[in-house]
Amino acid sequence: KKEKLPRNGSGGKERDFPDDEGDEPYLVPAIPEDTPHVPYKPLKRADDEVLQRSRDYYQLMANRRTVRFFSPEPIPEGVLENLVKTAGTSPSGAHTEPWTYVVVQNPEMKEAIRNIVEEEEELNYAKRMSRQWVTDLKPFATKPTKPYLSEAPALLLVFRQAYSWRPDGRKRMHYYSEISVAIAAGILLAAIQYCGLVALTSTPLNCNARLRDLLSRPSNERLELLLPVGRPHKEATVPDISRKSLEEIMIKV
Ligand code: IYR
C-alpha cells in the first residue's frame, strides 16, 4: 500500500525540513554508518552537589535580563569565540549543526545593520505589526530606533541553515533545524549570562533578506536571532516584571 502522508514524521501538518521531493533517493548517511560508539563517562557528582549546583545555576539564570542599554566597552579578547564554541555544542537533528554565528564588531558594519533594522522597524511598528501587538509592547518601551545596535561592542547574528551541501554537491537535509537553532540560542544566552555579559534577545521582523545580503550569507541560511552583546550601560534600566512561579509552570504527573 502506498504511503499517502509525506514521510517527514509530521502527519502532513507541519514541516521540519525543506522539500526534498524531486531529488532522487541517495541512501548514504551524511555521517558514516560505521561511526563507532565509544564509552561516555562524565564525572559523577554526589546528590548534595547536584542539588547545590541546580540551585546555584537557577540563581545565576534568574538574574539574566534582556538589556537595551549598552556600554561601548569592548569585550575581552577570546570571549566571543568561546561563546560561539559553546553555542556550537548544542544538540541538533541528526547532528546536522544547522547554524552559522556571524560576529560583528566593526563600527561601520554595526551602523549598516542598525540602518537596515531601523528602516524595517519603522514599517513594522507603523503597519506590519497589529495594533494589539504594538500595545502589548508598551511596558517594554521598545521603539523603531535602536541605538544599541551601534553602541553595543558586538552583534551576534544567528543564522539557521535549512539544508547544506555534502562535499560532492548533494543536498544534505537539516532535520528540525528550527528547534535545533532555538536550543543553541538558549545555550548561547546561558553562556553570555555565565561569563558576566548581557544581551538583547531580538528577532528582527522582515530584515532577513537585507541582512543576509549585507553579511554575504548564502540562500540556505535565514536570520533567526540578532543579539547585541556586551556590558550594560551604567544607567541601564529594565522593566520591573516578574516571572511565573514554579506552580504555574510545572505540572507533575
Ligand atoms: N522587534 C521589535 C518589536 C518587538 C517585538 C517583541 I514580541 C518584543 O518582545 C520586543 C520588541 C523591536 O525590537 O522593537
Image (cartoon, rainbow, N blue to C red):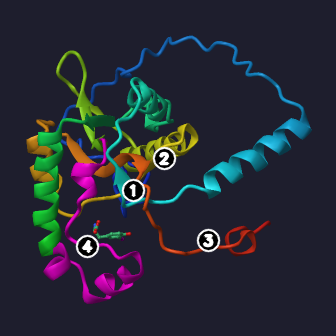
Q: Is residue 71 left or right of residue 106?
A: right
Q: Is residue 90 visible?
A: yes
Pointers 1 and 2 in contact (CB under 8 A)?
yes
Q: Which residue is mark 2?
A: 189
Q: Which residue is mark 3?
A: 243
In the image, residue 225 lies at what x, y percent? 32, 51
Q: Is residue 219 visible?
A: no
The quarter holding residue 170 reads: top left
Closer to the chain start, of discs 4 and 3, is 4
Q: Which residue is mark 1?
A: 201
The residue range painted magenta reads 124-153
User: Foreground residue, 181 or 51?
Assistant: 51
Queried on whether the Cβ of the residue with tag 4 lies below 8 angstroms from ligand 1, the answer reads yes
At x 74% / y 46%, what residue is drawn?
A: 56
Q: Secondary structure at mark 2?
A: helix
In the image, residue 96 lies at what x, y percent? 39, 31
Q: Amino acid at mark 4?
A: Lys
Q: Is residue 88 left or right of residue 195?
A: left
